[in-house]
Image: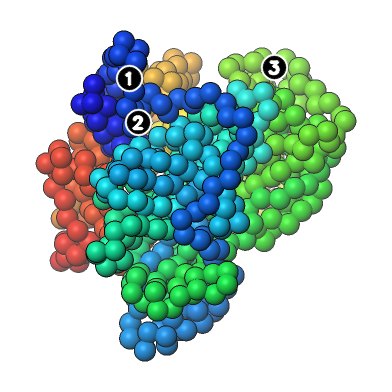
Amino acid sequence: MCGLVRKLNDYAYRYYVLDDPAVTDNVYDKLYDELLSLERETGERFPDSPTARVGGDPVAAFKSHTHIARLYSLDKCRTFDELRTWAEKIISAAGGSAVTFTLEYKLDGLTLVVTYENGLYKCAATRGNGVTGEDVTEQARTIRSIPMRIPFGGTVETKGECIMRRSAFFKYNETADEPLKNPRNGAAGALRNLDPGVTAKRNLDMIFYDVNYISDDSVHSQTYGIDWLKNNKFKTEKLCVTSDIEQIIAEIQSVDRDSLDFDIDGMVIKVNDYELRSRLGYTDKFPRWAIAYKFEAEETTTTVRDVIWQVGRTGKLTPLAVLDPVELCGATVKRATLNNYGDILRKNVRIGSTVFIRRSNDVIPEILSAVDGTGSGEIAMPTVCPDCGAPVEMRGAHLFCTNPDGCRTRTIAQLAHFASKDCMDIDGLSSNTLSKFHDYLGVRSPADIYKLTREDLLTLEAFKDKKADKLLASIERSKDIGLSAYINALGIPNVGKKLAADLADRFGSIDGLSEASEEELASIDDIGERTASDITEFFRNNSDLDKNLRACGVSPHAEKKKNGILSGEKAVLTGRLLSMTRSQAAAAVEAHGGTVQSSVTKETTLVIAGEDAGSKLDKARAAGIRVIGEKEFLSLINA
């Protein structure tokens, strides 16, 4: 049974910490059930057994917990000049010699202190006032990224941030009777719930960033940094280590908060030398060797004044909330999205509700939740399309207009997508121009664009000779189009620019793609059964679209693969590159004939590893895939 516990914990470590699964879920579940059965038969359960993570009996009340060592807050700065001034003070205190700094995310969650004795998980507590916190031992036990056993055999008090990832937050809210307001509240509420079973349902995560106390004084404290945590199976996040504060600033500027699966409200800069940390010491509140650079707030509250429904190019109706104007991330926000009618009900949004909004991947922010008891006006579910008046129908979680050929807004949105830069790239065809073409020239389909004449255009008030000739030339140029852009232009559901390029590379022609089976499509990376079904259904229902465009002279061609030092390579980028951003490196790979993949697969031929490369590097080495560092990569592309 002991061996089974070790095996399951190792599998969990690789899955939840390294993001590098060693077995399938089915294999894990069978072993887990076997352990559960053995524990029931013997009446014995090891202290680090994974069966203890599901959430035990509710606790009567939280007990107080006194930390072994005091926890300090972080001093803050909001400008890069303030950060430079702080760094200058550190360098001066070091006698003018170079100082190495580390950069980490300032995670927006709840600080947890987790204690181990003799290698085993002992207890967990909230930060509290820095001296005493709340004992949340049973609640934290349900978090699978917190190890139950570590190699270190002494007493150690570790510190980190308990978070609820955005993906877990949105998934939870899809079915929650009471949606969570934001991921931070989701994490804090779960840990402060007396029932560990509730905590377990939130699917929390834990990122460790410091050792608060350790009993082993025989080795220099430098040993107990991020690397010590990683070596003892703790999950960590470190961006870079450098002695150049300007590089730290550049890294902060390059952070794309929207691309992360967790919320951050800033970045943390620390002195990496523990001996220097000791010399610098603490103020009454802060360590002098660390500082937080704070971002602008991404979340605020405002009031809903109305909800309107917009029709997209697929006919889907999306609710859009009209808000009291409010400042968020340097912009005035007047509108925010809601996903669908079910989203409105789950978040209890009404006319007059006070709502939490946050910046998301889109330009328009999203409503997270409504403040309980606010708002009185019910939001009705539409029964007809707000544009054409046709009946709407529910497909899955969304409402759709049932008039594909006669809905003006939907048709114009489809045409605008077709003509856009990443598709046919017809310069001069804005939504406004296409609206006039629709209303006055009878343009209804992409093929109609290619049938327009100079005389047609000159009948419109906005068009004179020069403008008409320029647009017709742009339309003519678009006929000679790369296959990937053409596939993107067709408007296949769930097929964007990247997937269109993959499909073009795989099938080489529209005929090959349109004849592909669902099984063949589903076998391609990044295509699941749903997208495969969408593609085959699209070609069944739109068989004339490609034929009519070809009849107008549109001639998509398979792009010639670029020749270069990386021709034929399918490369994965991992870790932090010092000389360029990730997007610049990806562009360099493609410019030299290679293809960039998001994850290591059986088709990967090359991994380019920067600093602090993680599970992708481990997976590549285990699979015998060629790995090169940044220096070798630069030598290749600059040769």
Say if 516 sits above or below 367 in the image. above
Question: Looking at the figure, which quarter contains the N terminus?
Answer: top left
Q: Nearer the viewer, residue 131 or 8?
A: 131
Return the residue at label 3.
Answer: 392
| One can see residue 549 in this view | no
Marks 1 and 3 sit apart, C-alpha to C-alpha, by 58 Å
Marks 1 and 2 sit apart, C-alpha to C-alpha, by 10 Å
Give residue 45's position: percent from left, percent from top.
34, 23
Return the residue at label 2.
Answer: 47
In which quarter of the view is residue 550 placed? top left
What amino acid is labelled 3 in the image? Val
Give residue 452's position: percent from left, percent from top.
57, 37
Return the residue at label 1.
Answer: 44
Q: Secondary structure at mark 1?
A: loop
- Mark carried by residue 336: none
Between label 2 and label 3, give the one nearer the viewer.
2
Residue at 25% x, 39% y is 600
Q: Secondary structure at mark 3?
A: strand
Residue at 66% x, 21% y is 399
Q: Label 3: few (<14), some or many (≥20) within 10 Å? A: many
Q: Nearer the viewer, residue 497 or 583?
A: 583
Mark closest to the chain's N terminus, 1 or 3: 1
Mark closest to the chain's N terminus, 2 or 3: 2
What amino acid is labelled 1 in the image? Glu
Q: Nearer the viewer, residue 468 or 263?
A: 263
Residue at 13% x, 47% y is 626
